[in-house]
Image (tube, grey):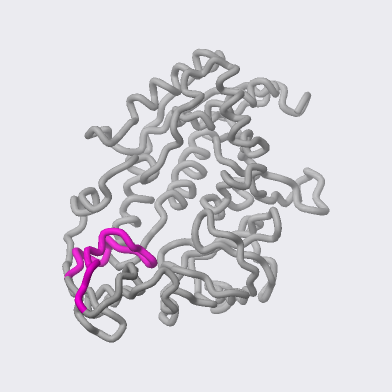
Amino acid sequence: MGNTAFKTPVIVGMSGGVDSSVAALVLKEQGYAVSGIFMQNWEDDDEHCTIRQDYRDAKAVCERIGIELSTVNFAEEYWQGVFQHFLDEYAAGRTPNPDILCNREIKFKAFLEHAKSLGVEHIATGHYARVGLADGTDGASNTVYNMLRGVDANKDQTYFLYTLGQAQLKHTLFPVGELQKSTVRDLARDAGFHLHDKKDSTGICFIGERKFRTFLSQYLPAKPGDMVTTEGVVLGRHNGLMYYTMGQRQGLGIGGLDNADSAPWYVLEKNLDDNQLIVGQGHDHPALFHDECLAHDLHWCADLPPGEIFQCTAKTRYRQADVQSTVQLIDNGARLSIRFNQPVRAITPGQSLVLYDDQICLGGGIISDFNEQP
C-alpha cells in the first residue's frame, strides 16, 4: 500500500490464532505502525477456556515480528452485550448466534472505541472479509464503503460481520481477506510462527469449546417436555427446548421405535406454548422446508437498504449456498419479508439472515418466527 500505509497506526486484535498473527505480519510488511491487543472477555475459570495459552501464542508472535502487545478486559461488556442476550434468546426457545453479536458489541465496538481512545483510527482483525469503495466514491468525505466476501470462498466470514456499518468499515482493515487460508498458513510458517498449524478456534466466541448442554444448564433451568410427531403422538421426552435446533438429528434418543421405519428422526419445530418438541423422520421432511420468512433487528452495511423491494441472494446459516431471493421491507423498514426462489431447509428463528449482491454483503437481520411478530 506504499505511502498510504507508511507509519499509519493500526491496532490488530490478536487472538493467538494463525489468522490474526498473519494479519499483523502483513500490515507491518505493508508499512503500517502496528501494535497488537489481546482481548480477555471471559473469566478463565476452567479447563475449557484456552485464554492463557492463546495469550502466550499471541505474545510469541508479537515478539517475533517486533510489535508491542497490550491486553484489555471487556468481560463486563461481553456479559451485558453478548452473553445475557445469548441466554435470553435460548430461554425464549430461539437459537442465537453469539459470534455475530460478539463482533458487533466487542470486536467492532468496544475494541474500536478503545483504539480511538488511544488516538488510533484503524483496527484490524484476522477475519476473511474485505472492505472496498462503493462505485462512484473516491475516498472523499462522502465515501461509501462496501463489505466484500473474502477471496477464499470456503473461509469467507462476512456472514458473521453483516452488522458492521459505515462507522466500523471506514476504520477497519481485513488483511487476510485477500488471501487463501493455505497461503495464510504458508506465510505463518515462513515467518517462523510456531502456531502456523494451530487448529482454528471453534465453540462459543471467547468462551471456547464446551459440552454445550452442561454449560447452558449452569445458567438456565431446563424444562423437560414431550417429544411428539406432527400428528401429536408422544414418542418420548425432551430435556428442554433450548437444547435443540431445527433440523437436528443427534441426541434425540428415539431410534428403533415400534410401528416406525428405520429412517432417522429430526427436529421439525418447537411448540413453545405447550413445551413440545415436534419431530419427524427423514432429512428432507417437508416440514423442514420454507420458501419465505421474516427478519427483524435489521442492519445494513451501507447504512441504507438497497430499496423497498429488491433482488439479492441470501443465506440463513453459515456455509449455506446462496439462494436467489426477493426482499420486501415492511413496518416502515423495521422488518423484512423474504421469498426464496427455492425452498430452504431448517430455517431457524434466532439465527441470522444475511443478504448479498454478488461479492457485496448488503446486511441482514434476525430470523423471526414465520407467522408471528418478533
- Quadrant location of the C terminus in the rendered image: bottom left
**Residue pictured at 65% horizontal, 35% vertical:** 179
Is residue 339 in the magenta section? no
Q: Is residue 374 visible?
A: no
Classified by dominant secondary structure, the portion drawn in magenta counts as loop
Taking the spot 62% from the left edge, 40% from the top edge, the residue there is: 171
20 or 348: nearer the viewer: 348
Depicted 40 relative to depicted 316: above or below: above
Left or right relative to 195: residue 56: left
Q: Quadrant of residue 125?
A: top right
Query: Is 50 positioned to the left or the right of 13 in the image?
Result: left
Task: Determine the residue positioned at 29% across, 57% down.
Answer: 87
Point out the stretch of residues depicted in magenta.
237-258
- Image location (x, y in percent) of residue 150: 64, 44
In what quadrant of the picture does the N terminus appear?
top right
Q: Position of residue 98 (x, y in %)?
A: 40, 52
Viewer-nearest residue: 132 or 3: 132
Residue 38 to residue 315: above or below: above
Q: Nearer the viewer, residue 190 or 36?
A: 190
- Seen in the picture, residue 101 relative to 43 is either above or below; the reply is below
Residue 198 lies in quadrant: top left
The image shows residue 111, relative to residue 216, as above or below, that is above
Pinpoint residue 327: horizontal percent, then vertical percent.
Answer: 62, 73
| Residue for point 60% across, 32% down | 182
